[in-house]
Image: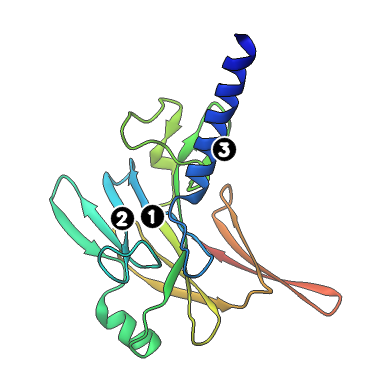
Amino acid sequence: MKIKAICFAAFAVFLISTASSLSGFSSKTGRGVYVDSFDFQTEQYFYGVNSVAGDDGEINNICLYDIKKNTVKYVFEQSDFITLRDNCRDEIVGFYYQIGYKTDEGRMLMFPRDSVSQYRALPPAVDTQKASRNMIIVTYSKSSKLKTLWICGKDGSGLKKLAEFDRSTRFEIDAMYNKILLIKQEGNKLKIDPYNY
């Protein structure tokens, strides 16, 4: 009886881990991004907007819903896309933001790695006011084959393009020092470009 219970528990854990790893997966491109969360610091929801309604493929924009004010904004307005990519909408392949500082662990929580359920209260050991008020977005252009690094406020304000990089560049986020690092090997040396967020 115990063996059956252990096997069932192991199978359940496997199913849950498989389902969570597929969240936001884009079958068309082989890349995935998860944009569906509640930010306790700003008290608003972040939702991914697909290129076509009803399509679970690539995400091209982020909707910001302020539940208290009942307002809706988008990170990328139509005019941004026209200016940035000659009417061609890029795919969002990365979405990150700080949730808050977890005092009992002495570290900053980052979405999506440390996602917290939006259906329950935030643990008391998390100080949301110590989190950066910015979000980090990475887009991919099918035409140029380059990724673009963006930063803006969690309310969508101050959208700024920081850099473009190719697939040979490593992308890292340091949550303690609020730095984004683009790391690329050139010859026998590493080139590291840091950006504050």
Q: Nearer the viewer, residue 59 or 170?
A: 59
Quadrant location of residue 90?
bottom left
Q: Given contact means CB atoms under 8 Å apart, are the residues at marks 3 and 2 in contact?
A: no
Distance from the alpha carbon under mark 1 to that under mark 3: 23 Å
Q: Which residue is mark 2?
A: 47
Q: Which residue is mark 3?
A: 107
- Percent across and percent down for residue 135 are 42, 58
Q: Given contact means CB atoms under 8 Å apart, are the residues at marks 1 and 2 in contact?
A: yes
- Percent across and percent down for residue 76 are 31, 72
Q: Nearer the viewer, mark 3 or mark 2?
A: 2
What kind of element bears circle 2? strand
Residue found 18% across the figure and 59% down from its top: 72
Sequence-wise, which precedes: disc 1 or disc 3? 1
Q: Nearer the viewer, mark 1 or mark 3?
A: 1
Q: Which residue is mark 1?
A: 35
Q: Nearer the viewer, residue 60 or 22?
A: 22
